[in-house]
Amino acid sequence: MIDSKEIALARKCLESALQKGAQKVRVTLNKSIMDLAGTLNGELDKTSHCLDRSLSINLIVDGRFGSFSTNRIEDTDSFLDKAIDKARMLAPDQFRDLPAPERTAKDAKEGTELGLYDPEYSNTDAQARIETALAASIFKSAPEGLISEEAEYTESITDTLIMDSNGLYCRHTETSFDYGVEMTVQDAQGNKFSGYWWDSSNVRKDLDTSTICPIALERARAQMGPVPHPGGKTCLVLDPEVSSRVVSPVLKALSAYSIQQNNSFLTGKLGEKVFPDSLTIIDDCRVPLKRGSYLFDSEGVATKTVPIIEKGVVKEYFVNTYMAGKMGIEPTIESATRPKVQAWPRPGLTQTDILEMCGSGILVTGFNGGNSNSSTGDFSYGIEGFAFENGKITHPVREMLITGNFITLWNNLIAAGEDARGCMSKLIPTLAFSNVDFSA
């Protein structure tokens, strides 16, 4: 998608920046196309075509650092003059640097090494996308109680190229085919309930759009007839659609930015056992044909498949080149690329298995607001989902609140399934915890 002319322009920009006085330079060229066909109640509602192209340049000029971007890559001469002049106006920053060449990716020259680009992407047109979206609709079959169906089908491609003055050259090209739908149903009393479902694939032929509307409809109908539920301590089971809500704050707390700013509840915990033996999270980031895989980060540093947390021990902080210099620690990678929670206590656990293990509690399928404190790990979230007894769902619940602390929560881990959704970049399965505080 990025053509040879654009590559030459990016290289010229890098070379010109050096000639104009920058000592070190990194150029990032991003290009993306997204085509959308949206339907409403089984009829075409909207179409859109979006093209985006930008060139970002990081400059180190006389010990000063500046970051600038433009979408006019054919003529960057005056852009570079202004960027370098502005960089010279900034305060010196001794810790700004490019990553050492031996840390950067050497196996991402073409962009297609991971197999995330579908060559069939270009063999379609707007009419074909519209037909795909219309064919997936079930509204005209008039399922009982269905009052609206709003859906979007998108096809997109992203292409990223990074070069720097240390000789870095790496590229990542990825296609994506996505379909999502929200169904709204109405009960006999006129109460409305909505359910959403989606799926995504890097390869067009692997996306089955025919299953998505029925699942969304089922999820909407399942919410009908919510029953007030008493508060108290009970088991919390998180559906894979929302389970990343308790993993993302942990990953954020492992960021050197958060630690350096005293805004992390995991400060000083590297190498320590903070979580239970049952918790292992790895960055499974180099798996061909899998969503979320990446061979390098935004600095061009090569990714690695490494444990982030291993049997409860914090094994990895996310430290880019700048924060490594500022904090006086070794650099790693800037963030987790494809975090994966490993199954516990045995492989192959399904959500049904986990509900049976827990006996009774609440299965959370949605969050409604709330917040968490990144420096203490305390949280408070509004939730909706389903109460269950003896491992079986009994009724929907809404407008409840869960509160607690992430370290305490994870130390009450009962089980982690093996049902993470492959269409997500974070592979977080069904999770179950004991002694969680719920309030009505």
Image (cartoon, rainbow, N blue to C red):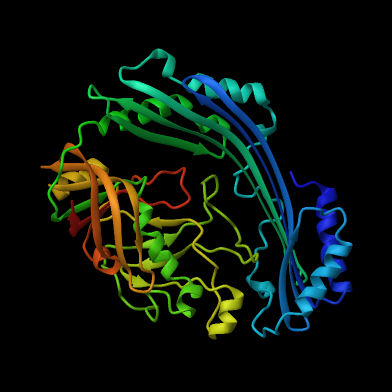
Closer to the camera, 147 or 309? 147
Q: Is residue 251 above or below residue 364?
A: below
Q: Is residue 128 above or below residue 224?
A: above
- Report the residue at 51% width, 58% height from top: 337
**Location of the N terminus (image quadrant):** top right
The number of callouts visible is: 0
Closer to the camera, 425 or 371? 371
- Report the residue at 73% width, 49% height from top: 53
Q: Is residue 231 left or right of residue 217?
A: left
Closer to the camera, 144 or 103? 144
Residue 161 in picture, x, y percent from top left: 71, 56
Is residue 117 visible in this depiction of the protein? yes
Residue 415 in picture, x, y percent from top left: 24, 54
Residue 345 in picture, x, y percent from top left: 24, 55
Q: Is residue 211 above or below residue 75?
A: above
Q: Residue reaching furthest top?
A: 141
Residue 123 in picture, x, y percent from top left: 69, 28
Displayed quadrant of residue 249: bottom left
Displayed quadrant of residue 356: top left
Closer to the camera, 273 or 248? 248
Q: Is residue 154 left or right of residue 370?
A: right
Q: Is residue 45 left or right of residue 239?
A: right
- Report the residue at 57% width, 72% height from top: 320
Is residue 208 visible in this depiction of the protein? no
- Report the residue at 42% width, 67% height from top: 308
